[in-house]
């Protein structure tokens, strides 16, 4: 990875875990990874890669089941990233920002279809393959909401078109609030009766990046579909009884 023209850094996932406190509901959340840079070490002579990760969140809980006198929270954030070292005339990178948003009320939860668009890169006949990753994302809501579903991904809509230097993408961003009737069926205990859907709105951003490669590159696309279940019962977020882990081969 030494002496590349530039180093592109992409998000490869994250874990957000509450510990030593009760978890609260997200009202805003953002995560950004800056591109890595080479930093020589004067003591060893080796070159290291340094990158900056920016993250922030607004966590709140204003519904009746919450402890309104204590909003102190402790969260642990683990960020996974991928660094790609680019060489001249072998790879190119192009970014594009996508913004979506929708609103809902107590009766109707609007399920916005994915935004269909494309990313345009460097027009060069030598680039035959391309992949897409995420540089950053932002979620902003009018207030704290219960969450039953959160989609935040970039899916390919059509393969890379080398003649136009374009790749089609689906920006799949959606926040789904509490469903009607869930306070009677899903969560055991007295707190469930105080949980209900609220009207609201959300705005989400994804900064996507396309990497173009020469014809000597092989791109393997794979989609993993599954489901997970965990029996929480107010166990600590990291305990064996609260977490279920599935390993998927790639």
Image (cartoon, helix red, strand yellow):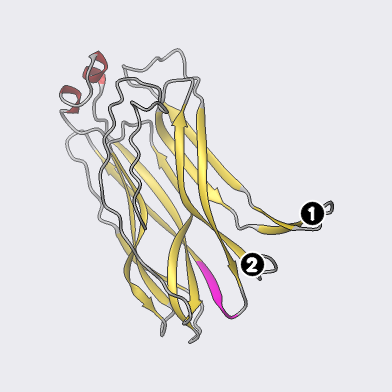
**On residue 6, which mark appears?**
2
In the image, 223 versus 166, the foreground residue is 223
Identify the image quadrant of the N terminus: bottom right
Identify residue for label 1.
41
For marks 2 and 1, give the one nearer the viewer.
Answer: 1
Instruction: Tell me which segment is drawn in magenta.
Output: 89-94
Q: Earlier in the sequence, mark 2 or mark 1?
A: 2
Look at the picture and state if 60 lies above or below 95.
above
Q: Position of residue 139 (x, y in %)?
A: 42, 44
Side (left or right) of 45 relative to 37: right
Could you tell me which residue is drawn at 41 percent across and 71 percent down? 219
Q: Is residue 227 magenta?
A: no
Q: Position of residue 19 (x, y in %)?
A: 47, 24
Q: Is residue 91 magenta?
A: yes
Side (left or right) of 42 relative to 85: right
Label 1 crowding class (10 Å Cα cut-off): few <14, some 14-19, many 20+? few
**What secondary structure predominates along the stretch shown in magenta?**
strand
Q: Quadrant of residue 218?
A: bottom left
């Amino acid at each position: 990875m030494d002496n590349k023209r530039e180093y592109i850094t992409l998000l490869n996932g994250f874990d957000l875990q509450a510990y030593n406190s009760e978890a609260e509901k997200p009202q805003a959340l953002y995560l950004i990874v800056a591109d890595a840079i080479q930093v020589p070490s004067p003591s060893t002579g080796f070159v290291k890669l340094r990158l900056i990760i920016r993250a922030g969140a607004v966590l709140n809980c204003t519904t009746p089941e919450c402890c309104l006198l204590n909003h102190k929270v402790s969260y642990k954030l683990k960020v996974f990233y991928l660094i790609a070292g680019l060489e001249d005339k072998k790879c190119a990178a192009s970014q594009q920002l996508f913004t979506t948003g929708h609103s809902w009320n107590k009766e109707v939860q609007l399920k916005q279809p994915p935004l269909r668009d494309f990313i345009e890169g460097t027009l060069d006949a030598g680039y035959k393959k391309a992949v897409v990753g995420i540089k950053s994302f932002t979620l902003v809501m009018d207030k704290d909401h219960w969450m039953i579903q959160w989609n935040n991904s970039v899916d390919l809509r059509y393969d890379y078109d080398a003649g136009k230097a374009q790749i089609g993408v689906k920006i799949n961003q959606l926040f789904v609030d509490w469903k009607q009737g869930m306070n009677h069926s899903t969560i055991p205990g007295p707190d469930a009766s105080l949980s209900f859907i609220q009207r609201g709105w959300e705005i989400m951003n994804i900064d996507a990046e396309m990497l173009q490669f020469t014809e000597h590159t092989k791109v393997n696309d794979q989609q993993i579909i599954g489901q997970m279940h965990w029996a929480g019962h107010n166990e600590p977020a990291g305990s064996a009884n609260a977490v279920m882990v599935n390993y998927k081969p790639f």
